[in-house]
Image (tube, rainbow, N blue to C red):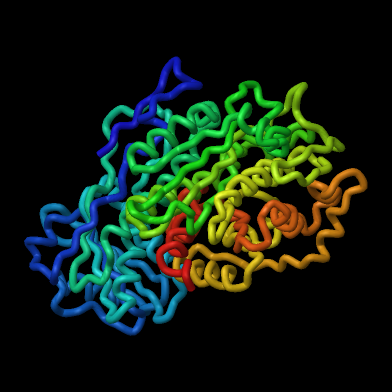
Amino acid sequence: MIRLFVLFGQANRPSMRSLLPLQKAPRLHLLGGLTGKSRFDLYDAVLLLLPTDAKPGHQLPYAGLWQILHRRGEATHAAVRSASFDNRRQTLAVLGYCRAGTSAFELLRLAGLLAQRTLTDRPEAQRIAVIAQVNGKARGIWEEALYAALAARSFVLPTAKRQEREVKTLARVDIVGPAKIDTHRAQVLADANNLARHLTALPPNWLDATGYRRVLTALARRHGLSLRWHGEPQLAKLGANAFLAVSRGNARRDAGIAELRYTPRGRAIRPEVALVGKGVLFDTGGTNLKPHKSMLDMHTDMGGSAVAVATLVAAARLRVPFAIDAWLAITENSIGPKAYRPQEVVHALNGVSIQVIHSDAEGRMALADTLSLAARRRPRAMVDFATLTGACVYALTERMSGLFANDAALAASWLAAAGASGERLWNFPLPEDYDTDLDSPTADIAQCAVEGKGDHILAARFLKRFVPDDVAWAHIDLSSATRRGGLAHVPTEITGFGARLALTWLLDHRAA
């Protein structure tokens, strides 16, 4: 149960309680075997997921009802049926089918359908049981997908609507039968996705640069991270003029690059991985002003930074045995008399001179200096997350995101993580000859091409100039950060795409 509240008179400075999620993922418990009817009568709903070639087991409580549901029609993939137990609670029974060998993405999509049916019929369900009637390793995968879907659908995004009463949210999920799921990891994964969604959904007058710094300070204290804020005066001394060109038009001088570190006790300080995130808190387009429809949702342009910080927090909670840095480029891209303009030439932190072509290509400018700063710590691998280009959306739609990498093995490991996590990537080429489209008559490199074709590739080629050649680097263009109607198991337009993917890579594929 959570309380949702309206803030009056604090439009620009909401409380920390509203900037951070009030809600955690439902508690996850394992029950060692099937239980009798009396136990099932405690639940608001019971979800049963079957292979398409299987039938509900006769040992199930209320087996007769499950058999009736099964006989309603053909057991086809993604079919979902429901009824109610004849008990005091009128417990909802939801039956779904999954074909063997389905992809992780498709499994999450199906799990989302079961969660949708469940929480639409029982919107204030407090306790739900899950049964995955499948053998072997697939059992744990199916169990985790169902839990992830319930955790995502029951999560309440930030709201300022007046609430007449307390809102009940899902508190507990029980896995019934011989479980294979890692409960702690599943809960941390769900919380990471929800944290990324929550931060991305915050209104831009709540999550301004000062508010974001407060959020990071609170998260660092809570999870044992170190935080260093590189403000505009410090960045000026470092020569981070690409970032400062973007922040120059802001009304307040509160932009900066946040450096967060997770370091296990007794481990080397050099990070194994540096996570870099684009944190443009609102993007007007600057001097090249966006039209209304393109500007409306630009508070979500900081989604890459939300993914990076959510991943780092989750890694700290899971106590991964290696050091990780996160670097967040936090600014707005505003219109004003001091906003940067086309044809300006600025020198980035690593000395590369940049000819500005279009002020709405601000993400690569802010990331250029952030990547250079992150590289100074000599991480063994770097990855950046950014809602960077419309070209990537046009190439892939919002159903998957773009991957670019300077190392074939690193690219393969991220593709493997994408397949395992259900957050899909497409590996784009990164050929050197594309650099000729960024030739500049006045600087070392042009910020972008005048024409927009292939801009996702050109943006990656631009960013590569700010990563040392001997550091393995991946760039993820988050075309899936938002999608109308949701994506896979996440029902909201803001998907949090990337946190689940990044944690799967860190935990299972980083050393591949």
Query: On the image, which quarter does residue 508 sit in?
Result: bottom left
The residue at the point 65 percent across, 21 percent down is 251
**Which residue occupies the foreground of this view, 499 or 293?**
499
Instruction: Determine the residue located farthest toward the right in the rendered image.
Output: 441
User: Is 235 above or below relative to 431?
Assistant: above
Query: On the image, which quarter does residue 40 sit in?
Result: bottom left
Image x and y of residue 430, in percent: 72, 65
Instruction: Determine the residue located farthest toward the top in the rendered image.
Output: 9
**Which residue occupies the foreground of this view, 404 or 17?**
404
Residue 292 in view, yes or no: no
The residue at the point 19 percent across, 73 percent down is 178
The residue at the point 55 percent across, 50 percent down is 377
User: Is 63 above or below relative to 306?
Assistant: below
Residue 364 in view, yes or no: yes
Horizontal side of 138 relative to 282 (left or right) equals left
- The total number of labels drawn is 0
Image x and y of residue 196, in percent: 46, 46
